[in-house]
Image (cartoon, rainbow, N blue to C red):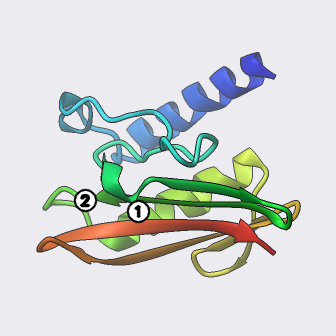
């Protein structure tokens, strides 16, 4: 399983580089590979996780987790949504509607809004 995840990561990095999404500046800030609270959702290169938004709560109905990240000034929220539209299905997520994904009994929703004057994306994982 670990080998599959590593191969998938290299595939995604190659895709992002060829699509022009991945640039040297995206790596200069040293982004995390996966969100702290969403350990199986990759952090798009260039995004900066907002640690105070990390939340994980297990309940009988399933896991609830939240994460958020700010975008650099040269990135648009649509770029982020497009990245996850391509990458999440490769991790077993099926898109059920724009910016909403289903995997097993979990639903992941991605939204964009401002945080402290910066454009940010917010991730909510909850039971279906």
Residue density around tag 1, few if under 14, some if 14–19, many if 20 or more, within 10 Å:
many
Among the two numbered marks 1 and 2 on one chain, the one whose residue lies closer to the N terminus: 2
Tell me whether circle 1 and circle 2 mark residues in contact (CB < 8 Å).
yes
Residue 39 image position (x, y, % from top left) = 59, 40
Q: CA distance from mark 1 to mark 2?
A: 9 Å
Please rate how many residues cluster around mark 2, counting C-alpha atoms within 10 Å: few if below 14, some from 14 to 19, many from 20: many
In the rendered image, the vertical position of residue 5 relative to residue 66, given as above or below:
above
Identify the residue under disc 2: 71
Q: Based on the displayed image, in which of its 4 quarters is residue 122 positioned?
A: bottom left
Quadrant of the rendering where the C terminus is positioned: bottom right
Residue at the limit of the structure toward the top, as seen here: 3
Residue 35 point in image, percent of width and height: 48, 44
Relative to 89, 11 lies left or right: left
Indicate the position of residue 42 as horizontal and vertical percent values. Answer: 52, 43
Identified at 13% across, 61% down, the residue is: 73
* Residue ID at (34%, 40%): 22
Residue at image location 51% in from the left, 65% down from the top: 123
* Secondary element at image label 1: helix
Q: Secondary structure at mark 2?
A: loop
Give residue 31's position: percent from left, percent from top: 32, 35
Along the viewing direction, whichever of 82 and 62 lies nearer the viewer: 62
Left or right, 95 with reference to 28: right
The answer to whether 118 is drawn above or below residue 2 in the figure is below
Where 94 sits versus 6, above or below?
A: below
Quadrant containing the N terminus in the rendered view: top right
Q: Which residue is mark 1?
A: 80
Q: Is 96 left, or right, of 27 in this rendering?
A: right
Q: Does residue 128 lie above or below 82 as drawn? A: below
In terms of image quadrants, where is residue 102? bottom right
């Amino acid at each position: 399983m670990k080998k599959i995840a590593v191969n998938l990561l290299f595939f995604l990095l190659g895709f992002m580089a060829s699509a022009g999404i991945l640039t040297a500046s995206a790596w200069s800030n040293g982004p995390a590979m996966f969100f702290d609270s969403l350990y199986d959702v990759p952090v798009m290169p260039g995004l900066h996780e907002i640690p105070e938004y990390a939340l994980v709560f297990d309940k009988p109905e399933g896991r609830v987790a939240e994460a958020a990240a700010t975008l650099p000034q040269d990135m648009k929220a649509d770029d982020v949504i497009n990245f996850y539209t391509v990458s999440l299905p490769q991790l077993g997520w099926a898109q059920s509607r724009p910016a909403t994904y289903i995997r097993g009994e979990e639903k992941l929703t991605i939204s964009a809004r401002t945080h402290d004057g910066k454009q940010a994306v917010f991730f909510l994982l909850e039971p279906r």
